[in-house]
Image: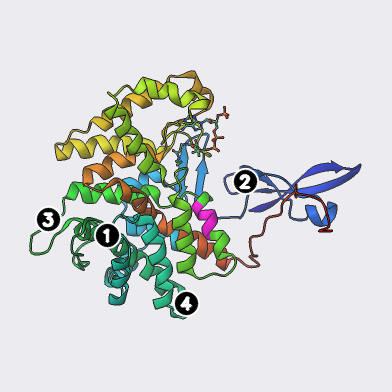
Amino acid sequence: MSSDTQVAKLVLEGKEVELPVVTGSEQEKAIDIRKLRAETGYITMDSGYGNTGSCESAITFIDGEKGILRYRGYPIEELAARCSFLEVCYLLIYGELPDAKTKEEFESAVTRHTLIHEDMKKFFEGYPRNAHPMAILASMFCSLSTYYSSDAGLDQNIIRLMAKAPTIAAFSYKKSVGQPIIYPRNNLDYSSNFLSMMFAVPAQDYVVSPVLRDALNLLLILHADHEQNCSTSTVRMVGSSQANLFASMSAGVLALWGPLHGGANQKVIEMLQRIYEDGSDYKKYVALAKDKDSGFRLMGFGHRVYKNFDPRAQILRKAAEGVLAELGLKDPLLDIAKALEEVALDDPYFVEKKLYPNVDFYSGIIYRAMGIPTEMFTVMFALGRLPGWIAQWKEMREEAGSRIYRPRQIYTGATQRSLS
Ligand code: COA
């Protein structure tokens, strides 16, 4: 951020207040109101934080109008085509892509920490079989803090989180289907190891499909960070009180769970399934989405930031077609998704409100092709988003003079009254 010579002038009760303008490295502008309350007694109102810059960050850049997403300056399209998920993790968390030696060390460290403490396995036994895996993931992330103290050092705990998250996710799935858990294998890469823990069964060979491995790698990269979204802001909010890394990540999982955020990928498939079972009459559902009284929204459509297209959705649309073709699968839900997209993109309601498919619209089709059950979709999102949360948490904690997050409010309740 650079301080500008430009200033904004605000006239309040006849008094002029000068507010500095700050400019980001991509020329985004902000009015710095940090001294506003002290100088005027006023605060600003911005429910939903649509106009509020809560921090300065050098991690992810999004231009919602142009459909641009970059991690540490690299376009998402290039990273998705050329990198492994762990390389992207390293880039997000430490600022640069790892060189060959660092890459090997990082991958080897993550591979060697995939086991969870044997005692933690007992936790899985206590949950009902139909427990939502997001609830389990959040609880397990928090529970990691009871086994691994902050004294181990941040880098060590980052490795632990990255390494153990897929193990926890896969164990929760195995629990839900009543199968024995499959331990991680050190001879597999990150994505293959996860697929093996999910789908291998004891005493039977399981060969990881390279198509699925690559698709998972792609999905994880596309979800890895998205600047100050709801879950990331939650992670920063919780971390700002100096809560530990594991607790802050647990809070991120919980924020992600909601259907307006990461939970949307589950809702998309449920919606497509509903349309399919209702005779694939997708036009009826477009009409329903336009009717405010129906309470129905086209899940996977719309975004707070992207107002032109979501670059991740474009990559995933192609990938979904590619994965199904390579596996020789046909999914009627993909046909419904494409038809819905076509109708909606031509409809004045969606055009005027700038509603486009978002990342969740096509991700579920690929997860289905992998055999991942719908309830696990948001867990998959969390596995992808984890390095972003870690990077943002680390950035905030390392920033000189970072303060606890503490917004203000305008009180609208009763004025003072007495019990008598
Ligand atoms: N279907 C139908 N109408 C939608 C819509 C959708 N998916 N998304 C937004 N709209 C309409 C709203 O009704 C609103 O109309 P209005 O201006 O006439 O009141 C307008 O578009 C703006 O929507 P709003 O909810 O104010 O936008 P937001 O920025 O607060 O919310 C989302 C963004 C993503 C939460 C919202 O678009 C949504 O609920 N999408 C579906 C859930 C989803 O896919 N979430 C994943 C996000 S990655």
For marks 4 and 2 on the same chain, the one whose residue lies earlier in the sequence: 2
Q: What predominant SS class does the magenta segment belong to?
A: helix
Q: Nearer the viewer, residue 262 or 211?
A: 262
For marks 1 and 2 on the same chain, the one whose residue lies earlier in the sequence: 2
Q: How far apart are marks 1 and 4 (CA)?
A: 25 Å
| Residue on which disc 2 sits | 49
Residue 185 picture quarter: bottom left
Looking at the picture, how far across and down is residue 264, in whole percent?
A: 41, 42
Can residue 58 be seen in the rendering of this structure?
no
Q: Which is more foreground, mark 1 or mark 4?
A: 1
| Residue at the spot 26% in from the left edge and 57% down from the top edge | 176
Q: Distance between the residues labelled 3 and 2?
A: 47 Å
**Residue lying farthest front?**
420
Q: What stretch is highlighted in magenta?
A: 231-235
| Residue on which disc 3 sits | 207
Q: Which amino acid does label 4 sit on?
A: Ser
Residue 385 picture quarter: bottom left
Q: Which is more foreground, mark 1 or mark 3?
A: 1
For marks 1 and 3 on the same chain, the one whose residue lies earlier in the sequence: 1
The reply to whether discs 1 and 3 touch (Cβ–Cβ < 8 Å) is no
| Residue on which disc 4 sits | 150
